[in-house]
Amino acid sequence: MTIQKFVVTADQMRQIEARIFAAGMPVAALMEKVAGLIAKRIQALLKEEESSVTSNVRDLTDSRKREEGKKIVNSAFPAIGVLVGPGHNGGDALVVARELHFQGFPVVIYCPFSKLKELTKSHADYARYLKIPFVDKVESLNNCDLLIDGLFGFGLEREITNFTAAAIEQINNLNIPIFSIDIPSGIHTDTGAVLGTAIRAKHTLCLGLWKMAFLQDQALEYIGSCELIDFDIPVEDIAAILGDSPAIQRIAKTLAIEHLPLPRSPISYKYTNGHLLIIAGSRRYTGAAILSALGARASGVGMLSIAVPESIKPMLSSHLPEALVIGCPETSSGAISELPVAIDLSSYDAIAAGPGLTLEAAIAVESLLDSDRPLVLDADGLNILAQLGTIPILSERSALTIITPHPGEFKRLFPDLAASAGDDRIAASQAAAKLCGAVVLFKGAKVCISWKDEGDSLRDSYASRTITYLNPESTPALARGGSGDVLTGLLGGLLAGALAKPSKRIARKSPAQAVAATAVWWHAQAAIMAAKERTELGVDAFTLTQYLIPTLREF
C-alpha cells in the first residue's frame, strides 16, 4: 500500500494522530522525530548543489543583490530564520531550529507570540538556553538566506488578522525563499482558501499524509513545490479512519499504470481492443477533430472512427490514414447538422464528442445523449448539454457518461453548485457527480474526478458513496488551446478498450471509471516530459500528442 495515494482533511488527520497518541506514542517523541526528518531534508536540499541552491530553495541571486553580483546563499551554512507560532507547528519549527543550530547553521528565531503551548514553550526555553537569538520584529530577518515557516499548522480555521496578518505580509515582501512546515501558514487545510493572508512558500514539506489543500487550485501559488515527509504512520491507523478503500485518493503512479491497457493479451485483435467513435470538428475548428483523434491513436484503441462535417473529411483522412472517417451533413457554416442516417451507434464500444463542434451541432449531440453508448462529452458537447438541461438529461442516461468541464463550462452546467461551492473544486465535483450520476472530470491545475459509486448494498460496506481521484502532478504547459481535445481522444480510446467485448479468454482488469484517472495522469505526465525538454512554452497541443507514447517508456 503506497502512502502517496492518501489525502486527508484536518479532522481526519487529527483522528489519526489521536489514535497514535492513544496507542502510547508520546507527543514530544513524535515532534522530535518529525522535526528531525524535516531538518535532515532541509540540509539535503541545501547540499544537492554546492554552486547553487536547488530550485526548491531559490536562485543564487535575487532582485535584492543581483546588481552587486553577490551570492545570496552560502551553500554550506546559509543564515536561516525560523518563524515560530504558538502551537505544535511552532514546536516542530523550534526543534528544527535547534537541530540546524547544532549542525552549524546561523539560526535566528522569530516568535512574536507571548503565549505558547506547554511543549512548544519548553522547546523555546531550551533554544534560549542554547543562546539561539529570538526576535519579534520582521526587520530582524532581513539578512537571512532562507526562512522556515512554523507559524500555523494544519487545522487553522480562523482568519489571520491584526499584527499577525501584517507580519505575514512583511515576511512575504522580504523576497526571501520560505520553506513551510506541513502547510503554508494561513491556508485552510481542506479547501485551500487563504484565511485573510498566508505565507507564500517556495517549498512545502507536508507531514505524514497529504492534506486536501495540496489538491486545491487556489492554494497552489502559496504552496510552491512540495513533498511528503513520511513519519511512519501505521497503515492500520490510516485504514481505521479512511477505510481500506478511501473514497478520496491522489492518483498515484501505481494506480495509473495498473489501468493502462498494457501488456496486451497475445490473442487480442482489433475489436477486442475497442472501437471508438469520435464526433468532433467543424470547418472553423478542424484542428480539434485532428487533435482528439491523435489522442485516441496514442491510447492504442483497436478501431478508430471519426465523424466530421463532409467538407473536412479529406483533411482528417490525410492526417489519420488508419481511421475510418465518416462525413456528416453540415450547416452552411460548416458544422455538423446531424449524424448520418446510416450510422449505427450501437456498433461502437464508446463515443467521445464535443471538441470543435460549435453549438450548431445540437441535434447530433442530442442523439448521442439519447443513445445507450458510453459517452465522453467535452467542449461544445458540454455547452449543448447545458442548454438542454444538465441534471435531467444525465440522470436519465443508463450508460456511463464522463463529462470533462473546465471551470467556465462547469458554471454553465451546474450554475447553482458553482455559486455555492466557490473555489472548493473537490466539493463541487463531488456534488455534481451526486446530482447527475455522471463521472465529473473537473479540469484545472489539479484535475478532480468524481463519480457516485452505488456499490452492492447487500455486500458492499461502501455502498452509495462518492469516489474522488485527484491528479497531483501536472504543468502549466497544458494551459493552451487543444490540450483538452487531446485528453478527450485519449480518454475515449482508453474507455473503448476497457469496455470492449473481449473473447472469453481475455480478462479485463480496468473498471471504466478508473480509466479516467489513468487518462488524466498519462496526459499530464506527457506534458511534464515535453516541458522538461522544450520548456513550458514549447508544448503546443500537437507536440503534446507526440509525447504520449514516449512517456510510457518511463514506466
Image (spheres, grey):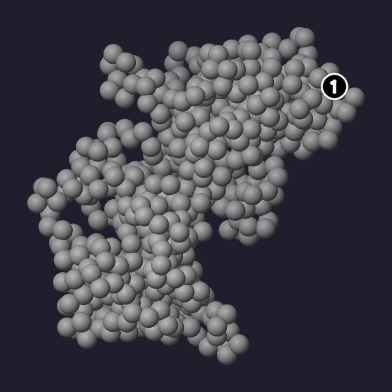
In the rendered structure, the answer to whether residue 151 lies left or right of residue 392 reads: left
Q: Please rate how many residues cluster around mark 1, counting C-alpha atoms within 10 Å: few if below 14, some from 14 to 19, many from 20.
A: many
Q: What residue is rendered at 28% in x and 43% in y?
A: 12
Query: In this image, 342 relative to 424: left or right?
Result: right
Foreground pick, 284 / 486: 284
Q: Residue at x 55, y 32 (%)?
A: 416
Task: Residue 320: tell me if it is visible.
Answer: no
Image check: 26 left or right of 450? left
Identify the residue at image location x=55%, y=14%.
Answer: 396
Q: Which residue appears at 76% of the width and 9% of the height?
A: 342
- Seen from the viewer's position, the closer of residues 184 and 422 is 422
The amino acid type found where label 1 is placed reads Glu
Residue underneath mark 1: 330
Where is 226 relative to 296, above or below?
Answer: below
Which residue in the rendered view is the most extreme toward the left? 24
Residue 373 rendering spot, x and y as whole percentages: 59, 16
The vertical placement of 511 against 64, above or below, is above
Q: Horizontally, is 170 left or right of 100 in the view?
A: right
In the picture, residue 248 is in which quadrant? top left
Residue 35 occupies quadrant: bottom left
The residue lying furthest to the bottom in this view is: 68
Residue 220 in sight here: yes
Q: The N terminus lies in which quarter of the figure?
A: top left
As helix, strand or loop, the secondary structure at mark 1 comes to loop
Percent x, y of residue 321: 76, 30
> Where does the image place residue 108, in percent across and percent down from the top left?
32, 81
- Toward the viewer: 13 or 191? 191
Q: Residue furthest front?
A: 162
81 vs 300, nearest the viewer: 81
